[in-house]
Amino acid sequence: MPGLKTIIALSFILAIGFLLVILSSALFGNYLTLLVVATYVVAPIPNWICGKAAQQDDFMDNGSNTVVELGRFITGFLVVMGIALPVVLAHTEAITIQAMAMSIVGGLLIYSTIISFGMFFREQEEF
Amino acid sequence: MANGLSDHRIFRFPKPQWLNSAYTRTAGVHAAGALFSLALFTFIDAATFSKSHLNGSHFHVNFVDWIPGIFSTFGMLIINSIDKTRLSGDNFSYSGDGVAWKARVILFMGFAGMAGGLAGSVTVCVLKYVVTDALWPELWFGVANIVANALIMLSCVVLWVSQNMEDDYTYNLAL
């Protein structure tokens, strides 16, 4: 069972992630890399909305399952977007290579924190 | 149940068991979204590079380069929004002869859009960049177009396969 230590570790990782992203923008005076944070914060939302939308009659019905899969598709899209956006920006020299690496690592830390928080503290509804 | 399925198969090697799990299906849908994102950002990379100060040539990405990607995306949208059970109309009584025929025509339009997108990207790459002797940093605009359209096609294949897994899975669950 997750307890206090899990919460402390997760918040520590989240803080490191934000530190890396903010450093990647503030060190070079170029705040485009904050878009990575926005992408990763938005990424779990489609799954949540589509899960709510398909909850009514998910039994013996293929139609409602499609909505859940649309949510998963958008989630996969947004996760890769969080990596691809700094790479595109660095390729056109809008940001530097160091800022790209720092924002990618920081964004992945933030997203893994969000995902593992959802995994640890999910309500035990399903059998 | 598993024996009942294996009676209908044609090939010697059976479909591996992990291909039928719900976990693989979820991973497949995620992977399809990831591939589509990769395709879009490959092309956006070419477009932004064309607009940035690094591009010193007279080659630029304009609307002509976007047309194959738009066709591929529409094809993928059409292919994956068709209900797969409507395609085999002869097995089910609730979908009459008209519905299966219409579904196949629309599916054909989707495949045609997708193949047209890939062919169009090769056409744009050859006619706009290769024939006019573009060198590497500018040739990337055409190559990225082909790569993006191929990735959209791959994403569509992954999504199609993982949506067809769903039927076997729910069937297993029902029995």
Image (cartoon, coloured by chain):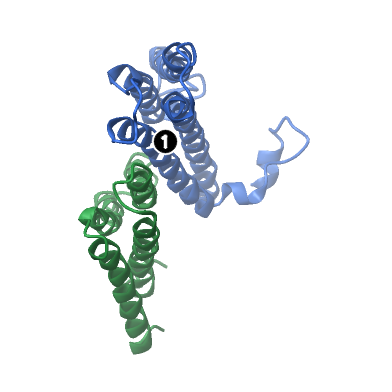
Chain colours: A green, B blue
Q: Position of residue B19 (x, y in %)?
A: 60, 47
| Residue B27: % across, % down | 49, 50
Q: Nearer the viewer, residue A16 or A63?
A: A16
Please tell me which residue is depicted at 34% across the width and 51% down the height of the picture: A86
Q: Quadrant of residue A2?
A: bottom left
Residue drawn at 35 percent across, 28 percent down: B77
Q: Can residue A126 be spotted in the picture?
A: yes
Three-letter code for the amino acid on which mark 1 is drawn: Ala
Q: In this view of the protein, which residue sits in the foreground, B23 or A96?
A: A96
In this orientation, which residue lies closer to the viewer: B42 or B85?
Answer: B42
User: In this rendering, would A92 be left or right of B4?
Assistant: left
- Disc 1: CA contacts within 10 A as few (<14), some (14-19) or many (>=20): many
Is residue A4 rendered to the left or right of residue A52?
right
Residue B47 versus residue B96 in the image, above or below: below
Q: Is residue B12 left or right of residue B59?
A: right
| Quarter of the figure with residue B39 | top left
Image position, residue B33 (x, y; %):
40, 43
Q: Which residue is mark 1?
A: B39
Q: Circle 1 sits in a helix, a strand or a loop, which is it? A: helix
Q: Residue at x 29, y 21 (%)?
A: B62
Q: Does residue A11 sit above or below A40 in this rendering?
A: below
Residue B133 place in picture, x, y as percent: 48, 15
Q: Chain of mark 1?
A: B
